[in-house]
Amino acid sequence: MIKTKSVNQYENALYEARIWRIVSYSLLVFVVISSVLLVVFAYLAYGGIRNERVILVPGLQNKVVVPASSYISKNFVKGIVSKVVSLQEQWTYESIQDQFDELSKFYYTDGLGNLTNANLISTDRFNYVREKKMISTFKIDYEKSEFDFCEKIQSLCAFVVGTRKLYINHNEILSEKKVFYFLLGDGVYPTEDHPFAVKISRIKIGEEGEDGAEENVRTLFLMSKEGKKIGESVQ
């Protein structure tokens, strides 16, 4: 009887050992397969990141896909530049200060933002606009405007042509004229400090009626395309 009991215990032990071996092998296979799948998924994800950058741009209210190389698409430049020019040109006497604050905080380099703020303060721009109850509208002429990535200097660049209408006392037309913009800037990965994925470093503005306004502004754009770096300034 004792011998039979010992044999049963031995057989039970062998059975439990076989069960645990099976469980162990199953776990090992599961771990190996999981590891392989993880590597595959990681490779696929890396490949996607390598081929393009997906940038969410709240200011444009859409998704912009930027190639992962240093090249920035013309559509990306067009979207960002249009937003910047719109903030600077389309305002009311109630919104103008907030819009320039937004430009300085999110879109301009520190140097350009400081120069712009200094000009606004020296001319007492905001108080003047509020006193006159001024409103500005602006329409970009996309057929005459040019948006590009200047590869030789690794910067986005644009020549923008548009029509500005200024009103006083809410709706009295003050002036209507063509305006010419040159913008230069660098595209960056979006971060907390640069959520809009760009920093504009140079702006030049010419207005209809000034000698050679259009030609002078467009020359800056062409110089950038040729690889001639232009300093940080605003006018």
Image (spheres, rainbow, N blue to C red):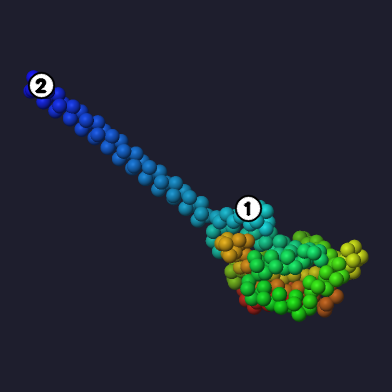
Mark 1 — residue? 63
**Residue located at (63% from left, 73% from top):** 110
Question: The N terminus is located in which quarter?
Answer: top left
Q: Residue at x 79, y 72 (%)?
A: 126
Determine the residue positioned at 85% across, 67% down: 134
Q: Which mark is residue 128?
A: none
Q: Position of residue 207 (x, y in %)?
A: 81, 73
Q: Nearer the viewer, residue 25 or 70?
A: 25
On the rendered structure, is 31 left or right of 161?
Answer: left
Q: Are marks 1 and 2 in contact (CB under 8 Å)?
A: no
Instruction: Say whether residue 39 is left or right of residue 26.
Output: right
* Type of amino acid at the residue the image marks with label 2: Thr
> x, y percentage for residue 3?
7, 23
In the rendered structure, which amino acid carries the disc numbered 1?
Answer: Lys
Q: Earlier in the sequence, mark 1 or mark 2?
A: 2
Residue found farthest to the front: 2
The quadrant of the picture occupied by the C terminus is bottom right
Residue 134 appears in view? yes
Residue 4 disc label = 2
**Residue at screen point 80% across, 61% down:** 139
Discs 1/2, front: 2
Q: CA distance from mark 1 to mark 2?
A: 76 Å
Figure quadrant of residue 124: bottom right
